[in-house]
Amino acid sequence: ILNVEQSPQSLHVQEGDSTNFTCSFPSSNFYALHWYRWETAKSPEALFVMTLNGDEKKKGRISATLNTKEGYSYLYIKGSQPEDSATYLCASTANSGNTGKLIFGQGTTLQVKP
Amino acid sequence: GAVVSQHPSRVICKSGTSVKIECRSLDFQATTMFWYRQFPKQSLMLMATSNEGSKATYEQGVEKDKFLINHASLTLSTLTVTSAHPEDSSFYICSARLPAGGKEGYTFGSGTRLTVV
């Protein structure tokens, strides 16, 4: 994998449903994987920064896992609420002198219907 | 928390004019800022990295004379789109690395929607 890829591109779920999306990233020279939540007309909001293989992080109803060997991360939302509607971005940074460049996926746009 | 203020949020300009976009770190010092561009249905693409007091580093394919970046202080970085053309119409957003380093994440401005007519 040369780029960061996210799937699905968009998702429509009913309130109360649990959902998950995928982020694939280059596993070579991996440094960190970032998840952001981005609402229209606002700044992207940092959710998680993950670095260790097997890492699992949780913030309320949202959690994420990381597999650095195979180059993927999952983001889970339990019991989706309308306020979870947003675009979820993942980005990876490579360990190339820690320049700090974030390489982004295209995002997954989540729409939660009441 | 650490906040980056980006202005303007929207701008419409005539072809051939220049437009300046500002990003200010409000409660921390940003030694490094990143400028991204996003075309419809595509991901945020890094344009350049600006470091306070030195020249910006541009990504391959980004014209440095077209997109002038200035990072003259620890709290302000600017992107000037010179002699703008309709194909420069896009969404531009800045980001600053938080003081603790890359593992602590980055904070973003709210973006600028540029339309060149």
Image (cartoon, coloured by chain):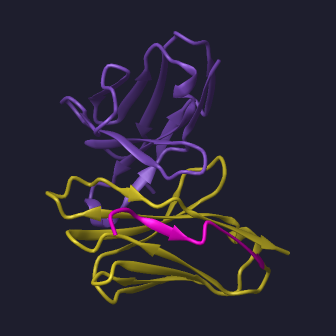
Q: Which portion, as a residue range, is magenta?
A: A1-13
In this rendering, the answer to whether A111 lies above or below B61 is below
All told, the count of numbered labels is: 0
Furthest residue toward left: A97
Furthest residue toward bottom: A54
Relative horizontal placement of residue A101, taking residue B19 as reference (left or right): left
Q: Quadrant of the N terminus of chain A?
A: bottom left
In this rendering, the answer to whether A40 lies above or below B54 is below
Furthest residue toward right: A114
Relative horizontal placement of residue A78, taking residue B60 as reference (left or right): right
Relative horizontal placement of residue A81, taking residue A68 as reference (left or right): right
Q: Is residue B71 magenta?
A: no
- Colour chosen for chain B: purple
Q: Residue at x 18, y 30 (%)?
A: B54
**Is there any visible trace of residue A59 in the rendered image?**
no
Q: Residue at x 79, y 81 (%)?
A: A15
In this rendering, the answer to whether B31 lies above or below A19 is above
Query: Residue B9 location, x and y as percent?
Result: 60, 34
Q: Residue at x 46, y 66 (%)?
A: A5
Pick the residue in front: B12 or B88. B88
Q: Quadrant of residue A21?
A: bottom right
Pick the residue in front: B104 or A100. A100
Query: Residue B98 location, x and y as percent?
Result: 33, 55
Q: Quadrant of the C terminus of chain A?
A: bottom right
Q: Is residue A12 magenta?
A: yes
Pick the residue in front: B16 or B93. B16
Q: Quadrant of residue A73?
A: bottom left
Rendered yellow, the chain in question is A
Query: Residue A70 location, x and y as percent?
Result: 32, 83
